Image (cartoon, helix red, strand yellow):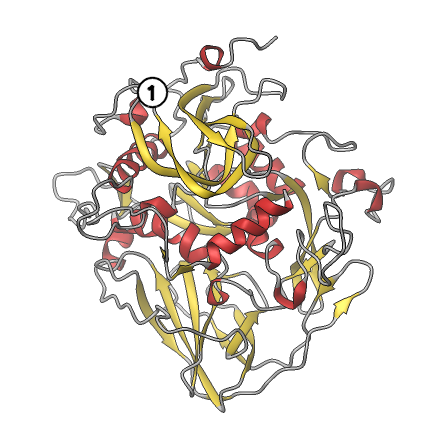
Amino acid sequence: MLVAMVALVIAVVSFVNGGPKSAPATRATRRHVHHHSAGGKTVTTDGTFTGPDGVEANWVVAENKKPGTTAWKITTPQTADGIMGYADTQQATVGQKVTLYVSTQAPSFRVEAFRMGYYQGKGGRLVWTSKTVPGVVQPACPVIPTVFEVQCSWPASLTFSVTDAWVQGDYLLKLVGSGGQQGYVPLTIWDPSSHATYVVMNAVATWQVFNSFGGYDLYAGGPPGLTGYPPPDRSRIVSFDRPYAYGNGAASFITSELPLIEFMEGHGLDVTYWTDVTLATNGAQLVDHKALLSLGHDEEWSLRMRDNATTARDKGVNLMFFGASPVLRKIRFEPSPIGPNMEVVNYRDPQADPLYGKDNAEVTQNWWGQPPANDPASTLVGATYIGFNNTTPANMAVVDASSWVFKGTKLTDGSQIPGVLFTDFDGYDTSRPNPPDVQILTHSPVTIGFNGAKMYADTTYYTWPASNAGVFESGTNYWIAAMTPCPPGTASCAAPTLDTITGNLLAAFGAGPAGIAHPSVTNWQQFYPTAG
């Protein structure tokens, strides 16, 4: 798994502002965006109406008509220590103060806050610019012994208030040094009063556990030469009190999440924005929404995250897992010196966790195959992590083209969706506990990178009998990245097909419990007939 995780980080780092340097082409032009009025449609009292790709909101349509800009992008090579920073929170609400901690070689710098969306295809809107502040090179960040935690304790650089101008959404705070240095700090602005149809959840815990800033993360240690897996000097605790060492400071947001956010905002969908922390602390509010969207790579889940998502499913809230290996590692959040929920804990070995034997419910480990919390992800997700391949993207093979999921695609059984299977994969595993009515939509041969094993990655869908909630799992970490527009003239492009499928899913999941109109048609036995 170490190789898989390191490979994924390398793959993410190879991207620059949403596009790979060398990866399969995606699409030539973005599908028509429905920036239309609600004329002729039934508009509810909360300003929503049903569109072709789901429930739309007038405020999202209006927001994305505002002037956009591409100035949020970093288009020139940057050195790791040119400018970098972190915030004292992962999400904030209107009225809250946010403090930034910045280290830079520049004599001065400013912060530009961009709300990310569609905005006529430009991807962002400038919402706020700070005053120019002096730049300083901050001290080195120490490593906390025994747990190998890198945690900075920098003096604050500036504090700002989140005003009404900060419309709920995902933001990139662009750090701009006076010498041309540029970097990002991501921030989610969420609305606790929202009853939006769709909850988009940023996978900040997974961003952080792959953050090698200072030489240590959850999967890799510092000095070379130490053997074993997991490496003995890997972090047991990782801190948000440090910059992200990849994605120019944005972690994997631009590559693994932004393409879907652009799609949703471009279609005016009724969306609100959370992070993993929001699901852990305020996840009981999921019942106020119709669907939770887990984006990109989202494998780190705490007990409260999982309990809240499971409770929501049991009450009819639909779940969409767009990445493979969700709910793989059992974590917990703890406070850091600058705020609550600013550390991610995972000892991997439950008996090494200080809470073992004291609070076993909160002990950190793998979610599968280990006491005291042996509860594989498959019971919630409907599929299981099977491995990775970061060398050659594979095609996705359709096996149930009659499903409503493929409406409008012209796909047939045996059709191939090019280059969608990359990095991590999920598949149906008969040896794990699974929901009773799993339907396999795609069943694609893949070669596992670390041992060359031949396996199948599966796109799955099931409906929960007690509530009719629908649960979708893509089977790949590359689904959202493959929604990125293709270069002109690309001969084979997955994005238009993925757009249509994604629109079908969002339309069905936005209408309420998906199983009412689209009950899953159990077929896993066709592909795994030898199961006992």
In the figure, residue 177 lies in which quadrant? bottom left
Quadrant where the image shows the C terminus: top right
Horizontal side of residue 138 vs 189, given as left or right: right
| 141 is higher (above) or lower (below) than 487 | below
Q: Is residue 287 visible?
A: yes
| 209 is higher (above) or lower (below) than 356 | below
Q: Is residue 277 visible?
A: no
In the figure, residue 370 lies in which quadrant? top right
Measured as percent of width and height from the top left, residue 182 is found at: 43, 76
Measured as percent of width and height from the top left, residue 185 is found at: 49, 68
| 196 is higher (above) or lower (below) than 148 | above
Residue at (62, 68) in percent of width and height: 242
Q: Secondary structure at mark 1?
A: loop
Using a 10 Å C-alpha cutoff, classify the residue at mark 1 as few (fewer than 14 neighbours), some (14 to 19) or many (20 or more). few
| 155 is higher (above) or lower (below) than 513 | below
For the residue pair 356 and 178, the one nearer the viewer reads as: 178
Query: Which amino acid type corresponds to the residue marked 1 in the rendered image?
Result: Ala
Task: Pick out the residue farthest to the left.
Answer: 40
Measured as percent of width and height from the top left, residue 119 is found at: 25, 60
Q: How many marks?
A: 1
Can you identify the residue that label 1 sits on? 517
